[in-house]
Amino acid sequence: MKAIVTVIGKDRVGIVAGVSKKLSDLNININDISQTIMEGYFTMMVLCDLSYSELEFSQVKEELAAVGEELEIKVRIQRQEIFDAMHTL
Amino acid sequence: MEITNIVETVRMIEEENLDIRTITMGISLLDCIDADGEKARQKIYDKITTKAKNLVKVGEEIEMEYGVPIINKRISVTPISLIAGASSDSDYVAYAKTLDAAAKEVGVNFIGGFSALVEKGYHKGDEILLRSIPRALAETERVCSSVNIGSTKAGINMDAVRDMGEIIKETAELTEDTQGLGCAKLVVFANSVDDNPFMAGAYHGVGEADCVVSVGISGPGVVKKALEKVKGEPFDILAETVKKTAFKITRMGQLVGQVVSERLNVPFGIVDLSLAPTPAIGDSVGRILEEMGLERVGTHGTTAALALLNDAVKKGGVMACGHVGGLSGAFIPVSEDEGMIEAVEIGALNIEKLEAMTAICSVGLDMVAVPGETSATTISAIIADEAAIGVSNHKTTAVRIIPAPGTKVGDRVELGGLLGTAPVMAVNPFGSEDFIQRGGRIPAPLHSFKN
């Protein structure tokens, strides 16, 4: 299953490292990553593949939310299809 | 995938109240008909609790995985007058209680279909069902009722119009302790549709499959935000912006519907393209119209603005999904729309303007509170006017009106939750009694004879 992790919030040291370390710990592979500053906010999207992870989607979601709390930034994960549906014909 | 697109979707959901308003499972009860009412009710309970047993669970799973809130999970069933009519029961309140119990068991907040289709006349079951509506709504929590009293092909059943005025009054009186809440669960339709997923008017038509799931989308906040970016631009650009936004939010509805259908192993019915407001700030259809340049919704220009919005939402949405159905248009339920509540309270919006608005959008005079002393015949006359608009214009219209006991113009009726707060609106003080007492039928308008 492919999913997109979005990370949006106030910039600080260690966001990319913190989020990618967590994904690696959860055995989630990163396929693509893109990051920018949008309207003053740190904004990152990570396209990842969950097929190697043994955790339930809900557990992954909780783990990522927890790392977001540590980094004081909002981390979400949603299945990729929702973005494809909305933005591609 | 562009990062800006990803962020746009996340913002729509988190900041602009984009959500799936409802996934509604339509269940046919035709195979539950039994001459013994007791047996029929047992079959109804068993069928609903079997078919819908995973509806809420699957809805919550999808919500979690896709990050899209699904506000309501609901059920619609075959009009009960058709099912109960075969029994020898002389009162159908027990059927409503069965529906209520089944809804509680599977965890849905509303179940629609305590309904009758009487546009041309009553059969035995219709008559009993109509008589049972006030008590059914007073004695159950989750049951919704609807009655179709007119259609473009059949004209308007004015006997039913007269009766519904009285039934609405009686329902208000029986639910006086909640300011007439029962009336918020009762819709009087003209040209009702078989596959509407939205409450309170949902029922599962007889031409539908045994069990289907349909989706109702929402998203007034998203449209409003999109229009903020085209301030002062001509209408062409306005219409184009609404279309593009509607396309995106409808695609989300289509995806969710497909996934629900696969996981429940039930065919996917339709996507209803309606823009449905909630009382939350930033989720109002009224505010979209104001964003187009109206000082307040209800002022001159409102009908034109709403016509553009309604049409553009459909044009954008139709291409985004496989099968469109239900009511599909912008809803204007007064008590459920923060912008419209304010417009009524400051005198910008009155019942006559609302009636004009219903001629060009879905669905009708919806969630309108009127003074408790409003007579049954005045309510019937309001229903007749709405039905005439629907029947003559080949569209669905409806009346969901609350003559809240003990209230007068300017009071507020607190209905709670998504039903919101209804400001009590003035009705015309002159009567229509002799008109309503005539009874009979208003013939179908000529444009229906196309065969």
Image (cartoon, coloured by chain):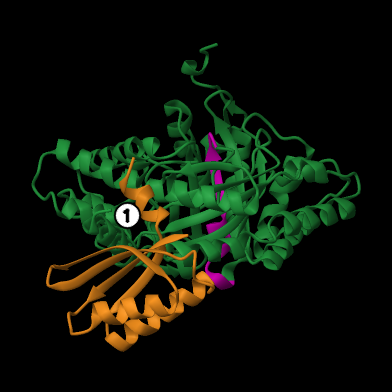
Tell me if B100 is positioned left or right of B18 in this view: right
Query: Quick one: label 1, few (<14), some, or many (20+) residues within 10 Å?
Result: many
Residue on which disc 1 sits: B220
Q: Is residue B121 above or below residue A13?
A: above
Residue A29 found in image quarter: bottom left
Q: Name, please, the residue furthest toward the left.
A: B232
Q: Secondary structure at mark 1?
A: helix
Q: Nearer the viewer, residue B383 or B8?
A: B8
Residue A42 found in image quarter: bottom left
Q: Which residues are magenta?
A: B177-192
Task: For residue B369, say whether it is visible.
Answer: no
Q: Residue at x 48, y 29 (%)?
A: B391
Q: Position of residue B350 (x, y in %)?
A: 31, 51
Q: Amino acid at mark 1?
A: Pro
Q: Nearer the viewer, residue B264 or B390?
A: B264
Residue B138 among those drawn in magenta: no
Tell me if A40 is positioned left or right of B186 in this view: left
Specify the chain shown as orange. Answer: A
Specify the chain shown as green. Answer: B
Please state the chain letter of the residue tagged with numbered disc 1 in the rendered image.
B
